[in-house]
Amino acid sequence: MALSRAHKERGELRIHESLEELSTDLADYIAELSEVSVKERGVFAIALSGGSLIGLMGKLCEAPYNKTVDWAKWYIFWADERVVAKNHTDSNYKLAKDGLLSKVPIVPSHIHSINDSVSAEQAADDYKFAIRQLVRTRVISVADISDCPKFDLILLGMGPDGHVASLFPNHSALNEKDEWVTFITDSPKPPPERITFTIPVINSASNVAVVVTGSGKAEAVHLAVDDVGSNSLSLPARMIQPTKGKLVWFLDKAAASKLDGAKFSE
Ligand code: 6PG
């Protein structure tokens, strides 16, 4: 059984005994949000990240989700992408295509991957343009208090350094307030060239989930979630604070092991 608690300002924490249990809860969560969004808006605009997240979403390809989810209404985006060819092993698109998108009946024209034949800067511009078009046609909604796109769900992983999407600690991309999508050419985690949603776009989403497993990330989870003073205010994961939306952390016990009051999960 998952332990769940609401953390003042930092969202809901769902702490799981095993990866198996976490994966099932994650699939249930995504399927439920998809259902609500399709009912309310007729579509589901979801943004993915790379890393272990895609493997943890694997249950969606199995029964009952493969049959019950309204895949034809899904529109897929990437919260961040490495600027490499789509068939490159580093491509987040390839990871998602191989692990998820090729296994469920998503409409190919609803999959919005980046332009992989241009520079990082141009790829970020092209992605912004594509998103703008889909905001116009209401495939993606708009946040009430800004003109930011409001994705139905943005799924993020987190690195041991507290990075989310391709927003790394102390990087100027973290402070980007005006652009929806920005680019970096000096990622501390290879490959160096990436595009990424900015903090304002992530925080405008209706739902944001951060999926984190393993003891190597326990300290970063603690800094991102607990009341640790001003030291961690600029930690990228801590800057994820949806303005109106809902934030959920999917953690395994190892990742949750350094949380204040971690004893509550025993
Ligand atoms: C990337 C990923 C990245 C990832 C985290 C966590 O492009 O590098 O999108 O942001 O989500 O690094 O990755 P793991 O879950 O594999 O540790």
Image: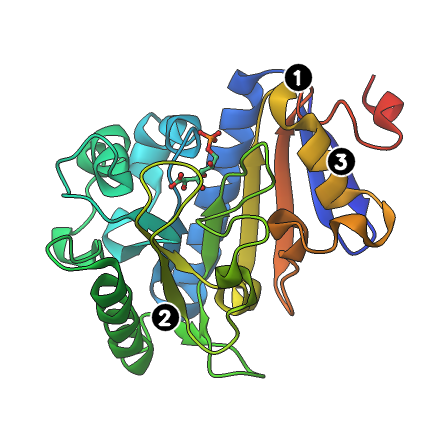
Circle 1 Cα neighbour tier, 10 Å, few/some/many (<14 / 14–19 / ≥20): some
Query: Which residue is found at the position 75% from the left and 49% from the top?
Result: 232
CB atoms of marks 2 and 1 within 8 Å? no
Q: CA distance from mark 3 to mark 1?
A: 18 Å
Other residues around mark 3 within 10 Å, as few (<14) / some (14–19) / many (≥20): many
For label 2, the SS is loop
Q: Which residue is mark 1?
A: 17
Q: Quadrant of residue 234?
A: bottom right
Disc assigned to residue 222 = 3
Decide: is 170 above or below 24.
below
Image quadrant in which you'd find residue 120: bottom left
The amino acid at mark 1 is Glu
The local secondary structure at tag 3 comes to helix
Q: Is residue 237 left or right of residue 45?
A: right
Q: Position of residue 31 (x, y in %)?
A: 44, 43
In front: label 2 or label 3? 3
Q: Which residue is mark 2?
A: 140
Looking at the image, in which quadrant does ligand 1 appear?
top left
Question: What kind of residue is marked 2?
Answer: Ile
Say which label, 2 or 3, has the lower sequence index: 2
Name the residue nearer the viewer: 84 or 71.
84
Residue 66 seen: yes
In the picture, the quarter occupied by the N terminus is top right
Which residue occupies the foreground of this view, 191 or 107?
191
Residue 111 got which mark?
none
The residue sitting at 40% across, 44% down in the picture is: 49
Q: Residues within 10 Å of mark 2 (few under 14, many from 20)?
A: many
